[in-house]
Structure formats: C-alpha cells, structure tokens
Amino acid sequence: MSRSGRKNHKRAYWLRGKIIKWVRDLAFREGILTVEKNPAYTSQMCPHCHTQGERNGHHFICQNPAHTYHADAGFMGMMNLYRKWNGTFIYPRKKKRADEPKPTQAKVVSVV
Ligand SMILES: [Zn+2]
C-alpha cells in the first residue's frame, strides 16, 4: 500500500473510532445499552432456518427450498446481530470434501 493509502486507512479508522464513541455516549445518555459484535455472515444467513442465502443488492433471498423467505438485508443483519448477542446465531458449516477421511471417534475412558 502506498504512503497516501496508509494515511487514508489510518484516518478512516480514526473516524470510525470517533463515530463509535459518539454513538455510545449518545445512547448512554438515552439509557440504551450498546455492544459491539462482529457483523460477519449477519446478512447472509437466514434467521429462521439458519441456511446461507443469496444477496441481490439490498434484498435477501433464502436458498432453502422448504422455506421461501425474502427480506431487506439490513433488517436481516439486525435480526442476526440480535441472535449473535443472545448466543443463538449459527455460523455456516464448511463444506466437507467427499474424499476427506472421517474423524475417528474419541474413546471415553472412565477412571475410577
Ligand atoms: Zn430460511
């Protein structure tokens, strides 16, 4: 990255920090609790059936054939962030390769 690119990056992070602090202070004055959560996958996962959907601009379409769900992606992000906050959000599973060996079951040994 060029020198000016690094400067712009640094300035953007500085501004982001200012905005977060300002919003947090404003919410605190109004008596609202604020928490920071990683927004990864929040606008890709269906909040009802936990399958990865498809984004079409600001529109979300659930890919589950048994579940037809269309919603605004921002609204979806809000619902999934709430799920992340209360611990019910489910991350997408990595697709396993067919030739991948199955993990061996760990033996349970009781010690008396
Ligand atoms: Zn769904």
Image: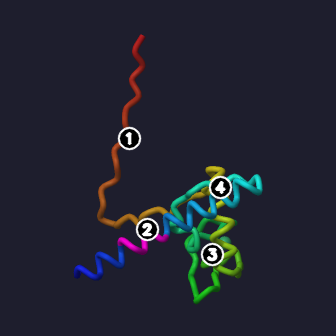
Distance from the alpha carbon under mark 1 to that under mark 3: 31 Å
Distance from the alpha carbon under mark 3 to that under mark 2: 41 Å
Task: Read off the residue under disc 2.
Answer: 14
Q: Which mark is residue 105?
A: 1
Between marks 2 and 4 in the image, the one whose residue lies nearer the viewer: 2
Q: Which class describes the residues within 10 Å of circle 3: few (<14), some (14-19), or many (20+)?
A: some
Q: Position of residue 56 (x, y in %)?
A: 58, 88
In this orientation, which residue lies closer to the viewer: 66 or 76?
Answer: 76
Label 2 near ligand 1 (CB < 8 Å): no
Label 3 near ligand 1 (CB < 8 Å): yes
Q: Which mark is residue 67?
A: none
Q: Amino acid at mark 3?
A: Asn
Q: Amino acid at mark 1?
A: Gln
Circle 3: element type: loop
In this orientation, which residue lies closer to the viewer: 96 or 84?
Answer: 84
Give yes or no for residue 107 being in the magenta stretch.
no
Q: Position of residue 66 (x, y in %)?
A: 69, 75
Residue beneath the point at 52% across and 65% down: 18
Magenta residues span 10-15
Between marks 3 and 4 in the image, the one whose residue lies nearer the viewer: 4
